[in-house]
């Protein structure tokens, strides 16, 4: 990968994760941002960090053992979060030196920041759900939110992103959330793809007029619907169609957003997040767009979705640095995003045959 492409992908990867935790923090406050001090995360923001760590550990395991299953690695990841949170009656994966990995050393991730009932219940039940056999019935948005970072994974096959996000959602949630997660991660992936330049070769070369917003978020949503054609008529697919129609006819309208997000279901969060992201006309207005999402009724999860989409679309540098700096999990999220790309491109811990250049990487991200 050449330097320009790597730089762009890094910006989008960081933007996805940082935008998500920014939306999480604003969603947790209902848009009422404290005047000073750190802005706390919620349990969703904490679980996003653990999910990204799980994606890295999945890759490490594959490099060192030749085979790896993402659902099992992420399932273990959620147990580590649960152990740090003091969730009762969950499996301890080891008697000693567990939870492991560098996130386990961060006391801030052990602070109670609200509940995640469907995830806690799944951990206590002890059975890992699958796409074909979900064990959860919850329709809340956590499974959707946690699948979003899968969209920026550097995988050879684009379709895997949607499937892997579905696998993550299926661990703890029901079919409706699984379909929403598959579509959402596919949208994130589409936002990482640089648009092709289309110009008639017969035309004389001339400077192109730079549009106000070079990213077409509705086009990415349409591309995701086409890629996931089997889900087009699902509740999530219909929600996306409604969101696109509303953004085209009545953009950035609080009443329209409230109509799209009447509850905390994953499909509502997906519709609200896509509506807010598609309504944005000026990329320098990302913070105000997320405030809109967070301040409307059930918009907390919509703010998280919109943050991930807008951060991926425009990259980390267009996120408001002064707001990001105040996030409780900003450094953690940014480090994880950078490490996710580094792991996928460089394998710093090496593989089953050769040692890698970083002797500490495997301790940070044990491959299990």
Image: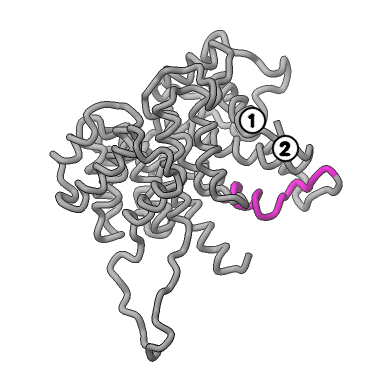
The quadrant of the picture occupied by the C terminus is: top right
Q: Is residue 107 above or below residue 95?
A: below
Choose top left, top right, bottom left or bottom right for residue 228: top left
Q: Which mark is residue 323?
A: none
Count of marks overlaid on the render: 2
The quadrant of the picture occupied by the N terminus is: bottom right
Identify which residue is drawn at 59% across, 47% down.
Answer: 340
Asked whether, in this view, residue 289 is left or right of residue 332, the answer is left
Depth check: 1 or 182 in front?
A: 182
The percent position of residue 111, horizontal first and vertical second, equals 47, 24
Dominant SS type (magenta): helix
* Magenta-drawn stretch contains 344: yes
**Callout 1 crowding tier (Cα within 10 Å): few <14, some 14–19, many ≥20:** many
Way the structure is coloured: one colour
Q: Element at badge 1?
A: helix
Identify which residue is drawn at 20% across, 39% down.
Answer: 257
* Magenta-drawn stretch contains 346: yes
Identify which residue is drawn at 55% across, 39% down.
Answer: 52
Q: Is residue 92 above or below residue 231?
A: above
Say which label, 1 or 2, has the lower sequence index: 2
**Residue 345 in view here:** yes
Asked whether, in this view, residue 367 is left or right of residue 321, the answer is right
Asked if the residues shown at circle 1 and circle 2 are in contact, with their CB atoms under 8 angstroms apart, the answer is: yes
Q: Element at badge 2?
A: helix
Asked whether, in this view, residue 26 is left or right of residue 46, the answer is left
**Residue 321 in view here:** no
Question: Alpha-carbon distance for marks 1 and 2?
Answer: 9 Å
Provide the residue designation for mark 1. Answer: 73
Q: Which residues are magenta?
A: 338-352
Q: Which mark is residue 61?
A: 2
């Amino acid at each position: 990968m050449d330097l320009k492409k790597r730089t762009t992908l890094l910006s989008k990867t960081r933007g996805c994760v940082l935008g998500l935790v920014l939306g999480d923090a604003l969603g947790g406050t209902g848009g009422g941002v404290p005047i000073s001090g750190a802005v706390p995360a919620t349990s969703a923001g904490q679980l996003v960090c653990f999910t990204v760590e799980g994606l890295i550990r999945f890759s490490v395991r594959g490099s060192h053992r030749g085979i790896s299953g993402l659902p099992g690695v992420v399932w273990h990841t959620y147990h580590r979060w649960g152990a740090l949170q003091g969730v009762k009656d969950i499996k301890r994966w080891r008697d000693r030196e567990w939870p492991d990995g560098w996130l386990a050393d961060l006391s801030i991730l052990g602070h109670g920041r609200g509940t995640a009932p469907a995830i806690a219940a799944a951990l206590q039940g002890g059975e890992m759900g699958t796409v074909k056999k979900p064990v959860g019935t919850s329709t809340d948005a956590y499974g959707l939110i946690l699948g979003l970072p899968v969209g920026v994974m550097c995988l050879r096959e684009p379709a895997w992103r949607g499937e892997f996000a579905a696998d993550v959602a299926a661990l703890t949630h029901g079919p409706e959330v699984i379909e929403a997660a598959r579509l959402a991660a596919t949208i994130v992936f589409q936002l990482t793809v640089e648009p092709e330049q289309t110009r008639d070769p017969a035309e004389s070369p001339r400077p192109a007029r730079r549009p106000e917003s070079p990213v077409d978020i509705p086009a990415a949503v349409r591309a995701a619907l086409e890629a996931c054609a089997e889900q087009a008529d699902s509740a999530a697919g219909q929600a996306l169609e409604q969101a696109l129609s509303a953004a085209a006819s009545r953009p950035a309208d609080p009443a329209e957003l409230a109509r799209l997000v009447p509850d905390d279901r994953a499909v509502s969060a997906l519709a609200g997040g896509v509506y807010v992201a598609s309504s944005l006309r000026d990329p320098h207005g990302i913070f105000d767009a997320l405030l809109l999402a967070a301040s409307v009724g059930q918009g907390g999860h919509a703010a998280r979705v919109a943050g991930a989409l807008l951060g991926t679309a425009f990259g980390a540098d267009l996120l408001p640095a002064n707001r990001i700096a105040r996030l409780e999990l900003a450094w953690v999220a940014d480090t994880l995003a950078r490490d996710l790309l580094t792991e996928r491109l460089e394998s710093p811990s090496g593989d089953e045959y050769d040692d890698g250049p970083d002797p500490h990487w495997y301790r940070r991200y044990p491959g299990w």
